[in-house]
Image (cartoon, rainbow, N blue to C red):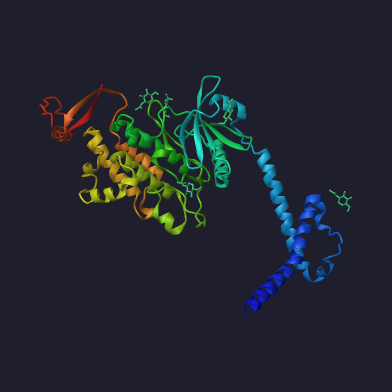
Amino acid sequence: MLMLLIEMSLWVISAFLLSLAPLLTKSYKGCKCICANGVNSSKKTSSDSDSDLDTDSTTSLGIEKSSKMNGLSWWQKKLKRKSSFSISGIRKYRYNELKAATHNFTTSIGQGNASNFYKAKMPNGESHAIKVLATNVRQGKREFQAEAQLLARLHHRNLVNLVGYCIEKRQYMLVYAYMNNGSLATHLYSGKHEVLNWNVRFNIALDVASCLEYLHHGTVPPVVHRDIKSSNILLNSSMRARVTGFGVSRKETLRPHSYKVKGSFGYVDPEYILTRIYTTKSDVFSFGVLLFELIAGRTPKAGLLEYVELAVINTEGNSGWEELVDSRLEDEYYIQELNGMAALAYRCIDSSPINRPSMKDIVQELSQIRNFPNNCAMLEEVPISKYAYDIQNPMAGDGREEADDTSPVLLRCFSV
Ligand SMILES: *[C@@H]1O[C@H](CO)[C@@H](O)[C@H](O)[C@H]1NC(C)=O
Ligand SMILES: *[C@@H]1O[C@H](CO)[C@@H](O)[C@H](O)[C@H]1NC(C)=O
Ligand SMILES: *[C@@H]1O[C@H](CO)[C@@H](O)[C@H](O)[C@H]1NC(C)=O
Ligand SMILES: *[C@@H]1O[C@H](CO)[C@@H](O)[C@H](O)[C@H]1NC(C)=O
Ligand SMILES: *[C@@H]1O[C@H](CO)[C@@H](O)[C@H](O)[C@H]1NC(C)=O
């Protein structure tokens, strides 16, 4: 019985090998032709072993040849693209330049999913941030090219500023203008920085909105960022924001695509997960989440949206969002700005994309909500009860009551 089994399996294996043999020699021959002279590979040199197969397999042979040819040209193209990959409009750096500027890549300032970031001090005194792609990450290379080509073409004061790139020694690097104050996520969650005041938070919201408005309405075709989140918002030394993280950004498509869902946990539009269609409204959803982060000082990983859904029970139109506010603000914020921003954010995360406002509307609305004049002459703390009174009766500004230490206060700005 055992012998029979062994015999049978041997027979099966050898039959399998035999049936494979012509295929193997054929592909081997194809390969040899290509290696010897790619152009002549279609002109079949009459050879002995498999000539009997030629007649009954011409079609399949033809297909195989043409696919080989495609494979060849695909490789040629790929090699060509690799060696001549260049991006107009930005500088191409030498590896050694960047190595020197980063002290042999020892000035680490952070780590992405498939990349490391270094701070570089250039000979002219400027600081740059350098993103070095981890080697052997195929996905990463595609994202590298997409990001480089996109950012070389797009320019906006709230868009990360790509100044150059470097492809050398099998290393892929992107060079950005350095942002002094790091990411918004670090400021909100690391506990290493002083608390961001309301004014700074509102500015950041406006900056990000303005960048997204540009991507959605100022470029043709519209670009969908697809990874808006607090760690992709960088701050300069005056705490103004630029958006980064363009590795997965693409032009808007209105057809479903079958790739893996891109984005970060807690920020991804549920409608996109369902339909696999990403539109500008998917960014609007993530932007709404970001607004709630600014308001609540809480990350989506810590149940931000559940927290929002609880808070919304006690709201009525544009009021009642106060319980959501980051307690670290110690009640120093404009209650109208807060409620306006929260109500807007809640429309951004509407489960139905069509009900979400466009970035154009959002920028307009945020600017209208904005109460804080840039040329504030004087800031004063005013008890909330007094503030409400002032709103109803703006002319009765002077006879301010004494507030006891425990009563909640708001910052009021008195212009000149
Ligand atoms: C292709 O074959 C022809 C003759 O069959 C030969 O003259 C020519 O040099 C070959 N081309 C290459 C690129 O080898
Ligand atoms: C730079 O770093 C690499 C590995 O990290 C090391 O092998 C090399 O010796 C360093 N070069 C210099 C000049 O420090
Ligand atoms: C990080 O990379 C891994 C593997 O490349 C991937 O599976 C994962 O989705 C990535 N995470 C993010 C947030 O991009
Ligand atoms: C932002 O950067 C500037 C300059 O580097 C620094 O003076 C300031 O303290 C930073 N602000 C915060 C909130 O970290
Ligand atoms: C910070 O960014 C804002 C907005 O883009 C810009 O107006 C300002 O000049 C920048 N500040 C510095 C110090 O670069």
At x 31% / y 24%, what residue is drawn?
375
Residue 1 visible to an observer of this rendering: yes
Image height check: is 115 above or below 312? above
Which residue is more in the foreground, 148 or 133?
133
Query: Where the N terminus falls, by quadrant?
Result: bottom right
Q: Is residue 130 left or right of residue 235?
A: right
Looking at the image, which residue sits at the far bottom? 1
Query: Where the C terminus falls, by quadrant?
Result: top left
For residue 376, what is the image quadrant? top left
Residue 93 visible to an observer of this rendering: no
Image height check: is 36 above or below 127? below
Q: Is residue 334 left or right of residue 388?
A: right
Residue 272 location (% of width, % of height):
43, 54
Which residue is more in the foreground, 304 or 17?
17
Residue 383 location (% of width, % of height):
15, 31
Which residue is more in the foreground, 129 or 202?
129
